[in-house]
Amino acid sequence: MKSATSDTQRPAGRGAFTTVSGRQVAPLYTPADISSLNYRRDLADPGEFPYTRGIHATGYRGKLWTMRQFAGFGTPEETNERYTQLLAAGGTGLSVAFDLPTLMGRDPDHELSLGEVGKCGVNVASLADMEALFSGIDLGAVTTSMTINSPAAMIFAMYLVVAERQGAGWQTLSGTIQNDILKEFIAQKEYIYPPRPSMRLVTDVFAFCAEQVPKWNTISVSGYHIREAGATAAQELAFTLRDGVEYVQYGIDAGLDVDAFAPRISFFFNSHSDFFEEIAKYRAARRIWAHVMRDRFKAQNPRSWQLRCHAQTAGVSLTAQQPYNNVVRTALQALAAVLGGAQSLHTNSLDEALALPTAQAATLALRTQQIIAYETGVAGVVDPLGGSYFLETLTRDLEEEAMAHFDAIDGMGGMVEAIERGYPQKEIAESAYRFQQAVERGDRIVVGVNEFVEEDDEAIGTLYIDHAAGERQLARLAQVKATRDNRAVQESLGRLQDGATTGVNLMPLLLDAVRAYATIGEMCDALRRVWGEYEEIAVI
Amino acid sequence: MSAKIRVVIAKPGLDGHDRGARVIARALRDAGMEVIYTGLRQTPEQIVAAALQEDADVIGLSILSGAHMHICPAVMALLAQKGLRDVLVVVGGIIPDVDIPKLKDMGVQGIFLPGTLMQEIVDFIRKHARSRVESV
């Protein structure tokens, strides 16, 4: 887009008048842009359908967002120490990052686990590790989010048994498991089983929790990873909400009443760099979901209509160059999530393009949220940007773009079918490449990367995770296997494997296996023997 | 006249974050190289076997999980064992500063962190890949 910028001071790159997602923006928005909007129908007061302006009438006045910092590394003991420190620093919820062996359902002694144990999260192989992870932390008093997908049911079973042994009733437990397998096929690629049996594990958790753990968020339908993989804001919005539709449909198809499980569905969005587009995205998400749940699925309970979401600042926007710039990026992205009305937020640390964060960097990230909450005044008014000609136009445009993707995916038969065809995967790969080309050409400026570059970056201290955690986890695994009742383990695994061939809910069988100290690898293998493993066809 | 540089792009380890691997694979292909992408979760043995089979001049490893100090030595040892010492090995991903000299000592020539421009990687490969001069 041509524009009258001064010759001497180009304010930004040639692509400056498109959003980070490539959307053209006009120089000015006026009442004419939103003349088709009807306040009661399209916006409504916060707490009123379709919740564009927020799900709570009082916004953050009633309750601030939860400052939930994702953390995990090394052994359960090391991570437990970090949690204790985060809670002492005023963090209000825990968020567990697991390592790759755990995420992939492999024990630390598996061939593919070598070199990966404890590296990008905490390793949890059996109930013994889960007990150490939450030692001294009252599970009845904290809310815990666990980023776990393919083996979500197994890890959740471990959490429930720890709570049981602490004496915390399941009815009172509150927290979230990510449990979003569709975005693994689409973006993050940490899948184990093929899509259809994977969906069964998800709906088994829905059904189990509806009866036994009613306050637990059974899924966090995640756009975060879709965006990190390269999607635009509209693609993130569309694919995430369409994943949500797929889960609801599978739940109904499994015989559940929509209002029995839909209120426990939560979402997880990225908070990227394009300030207004991101705020609009959260608002559009609420409006779309409210309509989908009321009109498409005929849900009756207003809580089924309300989209609750967690947000995390964009890891992919962090740069290794001039790492202190990342503090500023993260603050602005966090502000967008707050103005968009997220229920909880994680702010990334300045050093995460280089390593997992140090304790100091993680504390600064938390302080960033506290400054937004307590010093800027933005939490005092609900949806303070509502009614902005620009923001309302963006909100509507994003909604329309997302609905076009919905139609395309519905036309393929659903999201599982679309994934099998590679549709979202290809769309995202295209967007990722287009973005990179724009950076290469200098159409999009990344400060410190392709403009305002410094020759010698200041080195910062980073967290280094050595192999010691791997060795300690191997030792504990050996000890668990030596001291447990191996016959009870084998029997419980046999029942689990049999259960996979029938239609029974697998959660009670997993709980029995966990109580016997079966490992995550053993439980996942029992199901691998029945369902096989998924393999993606690699294309560039 | 030189023939196309042949590059194997591989994702070792358990990690599935393949944005970087896919983007660089396309960028190298657009720059005129022959690119083979192995897909996810390749063992060092599989990667070296692919390089051998594809007659690769370059192996590009994408590692974000922190497992590079396990994976890179294994790949370098296997290359030496198979007589592929002249294959250029480059790594992209999240690599702590302290590991960079160690990786270079074991023969990894190029290490590229987040925020690297694709052109820089293209130029590096053109400069350092073994020459493949053939008469036409």
Image: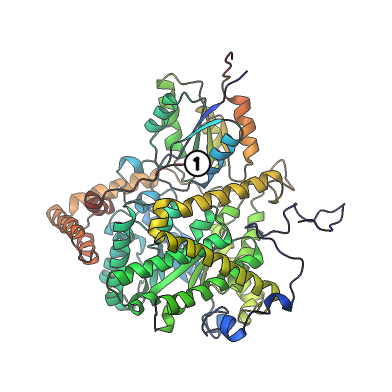
Q: How is the image coloured?
A: rainbow
From this view, report whether residue B49 is shown above or below residue A238: above
At 38% across and 47% down in the image, what residue appears? A117
At 37% across and 56% down in the image, what residue appears? A76
Extreme top residue here?
A: B135
From this view, report whether residue A101 is shown above or below residue A114: below
User: Which type of secondary structure does the marked residue at label 1 adopt?
Assistant: loop
Residue A63 is at least partly visible in this image: yes
x and y percentages locating residue B102 in the rendered image: 52, 33
Inspect the image, locate mark 1, and give the three-letter code of the amino acid beneath it: Ile
Q: Quadrant of the N terminus of chain A?
A: bottom right
x and y percentages locating residue A206 in the rendered image: 32, 70
Quarter occupied by residue A111: top left
From this view, report whether residue A364 is shown above or below residue A301: above
Horizontal side of A377 relative to B91 (left or right) equals right
Disc 1 crowd, CA 10 A, few/some/many (<14, 14-19, 20+): some
Residue A271 is at least partly visible in this image: no
Query: Disc 1 is attached to a residue of which chain?
Result: A
x and y percentages locating residue A16 in the rendered image: 73, 56
Extreme front residue here?
A: A411
At 52% across and 53% down in the image, what residue appears? A427
At 51% across and 73% down in the image, what residue appears? A288
Quarter occupied by residue A128: bottom left
x and y percentages locating residue A376 in the rendered image: 67, 74
Count of marks overlaid on the render: 1
Which residue position is annotated with label 1? A540
Horizontal side of A529 relative to A301 (left or right) equals left
Which is nearer the eye, A163 or A86? A163
Quarter occupied by residue A211: bottom left
Horizontal side of A409 relative to A505 (left or right) equals right
Which is nearer the eye, B101 or A392? A392
